[in-house]
Image: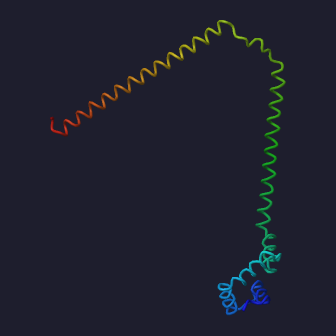
Amino acid sequence: MHIPSDELQKFRDGAMNTDEMIHFLEHMEQCDFCLEQLIQDEETSSEHAPAYLRDEILKKAASPEIQASRKIHETAYWMKLLCTGLRTAVGMGVALIMLFSVSQTDFTSLHTSSETKARISSSFDIGFNLSQLSRKIGSQLSENSQNISDNLSDLTNKIINGGK
């Protein structure tokens, strides 16, 4: 025997006493048909929260701490928007200033002379030579530190083995 629809309604409303609830749950555990019926009713139900819960939610939403929190979040949003707008405006202002100042700059004076080119070339040569020198020094230090490490290891082994 399946659960009648009025019992399903009592279950949804929370109007069952303890014995009825135990009987209902035991039946649901063993009857797939009634369980499917309950699941389908829940999926198609467009009921809202119970009235007591709805009232508590509305009362909590109207509370000062929730209203203050909402205002803080709203103000924070507008402050972020304001800051973003100010950054954009400052960036555009700087870009315009640069645009107008660059248009008055004489770029012909920036052409390098042969003397400047020679200095730049020699500084590149100096940099390359310094790089080669530092690599050579690094490799020699590595070799010498490896030799020292090997000699110390040999000496330690001789001491451990009693001088043999």
Looking at the rendered image, the quarter that the C terminus falls into is: top left
Q: In which quarter of the image is the N terminus?
A: bottom right
Q: Residue at x 41, y 24 (%)?
A: 139
| Point 77% across, 53% down: residue | 76
Residue 132, placed above or below residue 61: above
Count the labels in the image.
0
Using the image as rendered, state which of residue 20 and residue 91 is in the foreground: 20
Q: Which residue is drawn at 79% across and 62% down?
A: 70
At a point 79% along the width and 50% down the height, the residue shown is 79
Answer left or right for 83 relative to 149. right
Quadrant in the picture for residue 67: bottom right
Image coordinates of residue 48 in percent, x first then y, are: 82, 76
Q: Which of 79 and 164 is in front in this view?
A: 164
Q: In which quarter of the image is residue 161?
A: top left
Q: Where is residue 4 in the image (x, y as percent from the top left)?
A: 77, 90
Left or right of 56: which side holds 124? left
Apparent side of residue 104 relative to residue 127 in the rendered image (left or right): right
Task: Classify 115 as above or below 51.
Answer: above
Is 162 situated above or below 135? below
- Quarter of the figure with residue 45: bottom right
Residue 94: percent from left, percent from top: 80, 31
